[in-house]
Amino acid sequence: MHDFLLSRSTPGQYARALHSTVDTVAVHLAGTRAPRSDAGPAELEQLVAAVDLDRPLGDLEAVLEETRALYLDHAVHFHDPGYMAHLNCPVAIPAVAAEAFTAATNTAVESWDQSTVATLVEQRLVDWTADRIGFPAADGPDGVFTSGGTQSNLQALFTAREERLSRPHPRARQDRLGRLRVLAGEHAHFSVARAAHLLGLPRDAVVALPARRDGCLDPVALERALHGAAAAGDEVMAVVATAGSTDLGLIDPLPAVADACRAHGAWLHVDAAYGGGLLVSPSHRGLLDGIERADSVTVDFHKSWFQPVAASALLLREGRHLGLSTWSAEYLNPRHAVRPNLVDKSLQTTRRFDALKLWMTLRTVGAEALGRSLDRAVDLAREAAAAVAAAPDMELLGEPALSTVLFRHRPPGTGEAEADRLVETVRTALFDTGRAVVASTVVGGRRWLKLTLLNPRTDLADVEHVLGLVREAAREAAREAAREQAPLSTAGAR
Ligand SMILES: *Cc1c(COP(=O)(O)O)cnc(C)c1O
């Protein structure tokens, strides 16, 4: 009875189950040849629907086989060189090993009495990351692990709002809420606007500043907006700069933005969900110069640090501001507790010990190895852009800023609208065949294919291969269009 539960009397079952699982995954990994299968939504729906949840198989081996066929065979594989769509990375093996530790132990890090040493491990990594950012120790930096950049951004903006509202002001809190503004670049992540909405700010609270020619946040426009807000009686509760925009990888001019924020007493949040990996880059750390002047920083370890989902953090220059979201419960984290309770700093209560993944990665390969892996992806993006630029039937949007490449297939004589349409046709065709997964987006009113490169083992030949698939898909689409046209033209000729 109950021997499916992990305990001191079931180490054998546990070890057998995990070994079998790991073997299944290892065999599967060795056999992957594409980022995904070619199964369509209807087939997958059928597969899932066919499972009778009320009739357990009663045997893990059988379940592993069923789940392999259901899940592994059809999962999207981020480690495959043909996967170039979003900000997903191949994961560090020590981090995957850490997942086995935390899953078995099931630590929840919210209170000292649930986590003890795990609290200290997370805190060490928070301090380490704050140090890498360059926050002055004298300001008492602090932070907390979160489920992702979305949550980090929400907590950053919440903290900024509360910090702003804690400043003396003739108007009442309720009256001030409607006058709060967030100034951000046009390319700020959508989670910024949604966070503002969740925080009860008015619809127009987030002001997208006109971009500089290169697409980055324009410090001159920022200055103007800060003055304008003050003149209008609005309060700027935060300025959001992006270090690695999701589409273009653009890094806003952090020193100039920090100058403007300092001059106006505005909270500076740097969303480095994507670019945060540069903190450990041997070659490109300089791109983040100025980040140490932020009030808060979002870093996604599950993007450019090769960690499994979920692993992210919010770091604050003045850690004391984390207290602005602290809520106490007698049963969990009473006021004036003598031991640290991380729930005091987090928007979550029960929370995974995600920090162990980064910890074990740093202890195994070290930060520089992570940085070098990201550097390789940055270099590859430049090589890929050069290859696209050299191809007469491809159009490159611009030089990559980080590790994304935006381009489209546009043989000579193809109009803008046709090139736009081709982007979606091609992207869908690649996905449906399962041979490559690329993203698409709109920049400057036109649609582009996007390669997000985060795999240091992907090389130029892999990119060339995808370019070949793009051409093939376009040709196939053209043939299909011609076939559809054919009966009409035959009829017309008669
Ligand atoms: C990915 C991303 C986010 C959101 O992070 P999640 O971990 O997906 O929640 C926020 N900002 C930027 C710039 C991002 O690229």
Image (cartoon, helix red, strand yellow):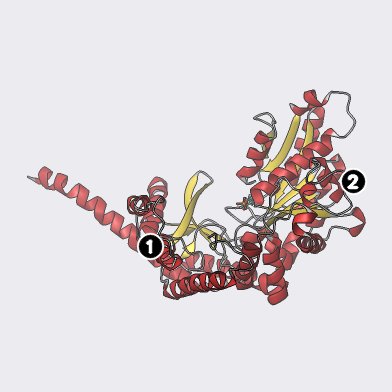
Tag 2 secondary structure: loop
Q: As rendered, which of 365 and 111 lies closer to the eye?
A: 111
On the image, which quarter does residue 36 sit in?
Answer: bottom left
On the question of residue 282 being in view, the answer is: no
Of pointers 2 and 1, the one earlier in the residue sequence: 1
Looking at the picture, which amino acid does disc 1 mark? Ser
Question: Closer to the observer: label 2 or label 1?
Answer: 2
The numbered disc on residue 336 is: 2
What number is the disc on residue 37?
Answer: 1
Specify whether residue 364 is in view.
yes
Residue 180, compared with residue 483, is above or below; it is: above
**174 relative to 417, above or below:** above
In depth, the one of 8 and 135 nearer the eye is 8
Residue 469 x/y as whole percent: 38, 64
134 in relation to 269, above or below: below
Per the model, the C-alpha gap separating discs 2 and 1 is: 55 Å
**Local SS, label 1:** loop
77 relative to 197 in the view: left or right: left
Badge 2 vs badge 1, beta-carbon distance below 8 Å: no
As drawn, which residue projects farthest toward the front?
1
Outermost residue toward the right in this view: 138
* Residue 15 relative to residue 43: left or right: right
